[in-house]
Amino acid sequence: MDLGLKGKVVVISGGAGVKGSIGETILQHLVAEGAIPAIIDRNSRGFEYVNEIQKKGIDAIFCQTDVTKAEQIETAVQIIASKYGKIDVVINNVGVNDGVGFEASYEEFMNSLKLNMVSYFLVVKYALKYLKTSRGAILNIGSKVALTGQGGTSGYAASKGGVLGLTREWAVDLIKDKIRVNAIIIAESWTPSYDNWIKTLENGAEKLQSITKKIPLENRMTTPSEIANTCLFVISEKSSHTTGQFITVDGGYVHLDRALLTE
C-alpha cells in the first residue's frame, strides 16, 4: 500500500535499536515506503543502518545523540533540518523499562524521566517550527504500563503516563497548525529485549506461555511489524483526520473483557 510517505523526512528517536526491535522495525518500514529516515539515537549502530539504507538508493541520516542531553537533541534536529530543509514527521520511540522504583535514588528517577519522557518534549520542541511549515505529524510510542501499572518501575510508568498526557496536550496546542499528534500503546510484543528477559527467568517458558494465554486475539504476542504498520498508517495522510488518539496495538490485551480468558 502506498501511504504517500515517499520523500518525507521522518525524525525517529530510538531508531537504532537492535535488529528486530520496535524502533529498528519502524525504521525498515519507513525505508520500504520511500521515506527519508533521520535517526536520533545514542548507539553507533545507526551509522551501519544508514549505510545499509543508502545502498538501497534511499537517503538517510544518523545523528548520534544522548537524548537525556537537551543540547545534543537541539544540535541533532538542526543538522537534520539543515540537510533537508524540512521535517515532515517526528516519531518519538525512546523507551527503556529501567526498573526505577522506590529503592532508586532521586537522580535515577529523574534520569528515567529525562530518557523516557523529557526527550519526547525536546525533540518536538526543536522540530516544531519545521513541523508547522510542513503541517506534519507527531507520533509518540507509549506503553500499557501508563494505563495498567506494572510494579517496581515508577520512573518508566510516570514517563509513559506523561507521554499520553503530552499527546493530548500537543494535539490541542497544535490543532491550529494542522499538526496531528497521536500515540501508539504497546503491550506484549516479541522483541529481542523481551526474548532476553524471558531467558533470564528460571521458568521462562512457563512465564511466556502464561503471558500469551492472556492475549485474547490468537493468544500470541504482537509482532514489531504489526506495530510498525500501524505507526506508518497513523503518520500518513491516510489517517488525515485522526489526532489526539491513543491507539492500542495489543491483540486486546489491555481493554477486552477478562471473561475472554476463561478456559
Image (tube, grey):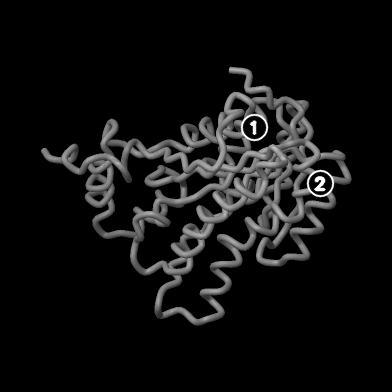
The residue carrying mark 2 is 80
- Residue type at mark 2? Ile
Q: Is residue 147 left or right of residue 12?
A: left
Which residue is drawn at the image coordinates 77% and 41% (left, top)?
87
Q: Residues within 10 Å of mark 2 (few under 14, many from 20)?
A: many
**Horizontal and vertical percent for residue 80?**
81, 46
Pick the front one: 94 or 205: 94
Question: Which image quadrant: the C terminus?
Answer: top left
Pick the front one: 160 or 99: 160
View extreme (front): residue: 176
Q: Measure the C-alpha gap from mark 1 to mark 2.
A: 17 Å
- Residue type at mark 1? Leu
Residue 58 tag number: none
Q: Is residue 85 left or right of residue 41?
A: right
At mark 1, the secondary structure is helix
At mark 2, the secondary structure is helix
**Horizontal and vertical percent for residue 206?**
22, 50
**Horizontal and vertical percent for residue 132?**
77, 42
Question: Which image quadrant: the N terminus?
Answer: top right
View extreme (left): residue: 263
Q: Residues within 10 Å of mark 1 (few under 14, many from 20)?
A: many
Q: Is residue 190 left or right of residue 10?
A: left
Q: Quadrant of residue 73?
A: bottom right
Q: How many marks?
A: 2
Which residue is drawn at the image coordinates 77% and 33% (left, top)?
54
Q: Is residue 217 left or right of residue 133?
A: left
Point out the tag, 1 or 2, that comes first from the N-terminus.
1
Which residue is drawn at the image coordinates 64% and 43% (left, top)?
138
The residue carrying mark 1 is 30
**Horizontal and vertical percent for residue 193?**
46, 52
Pick the front one: 192 or 62: 62
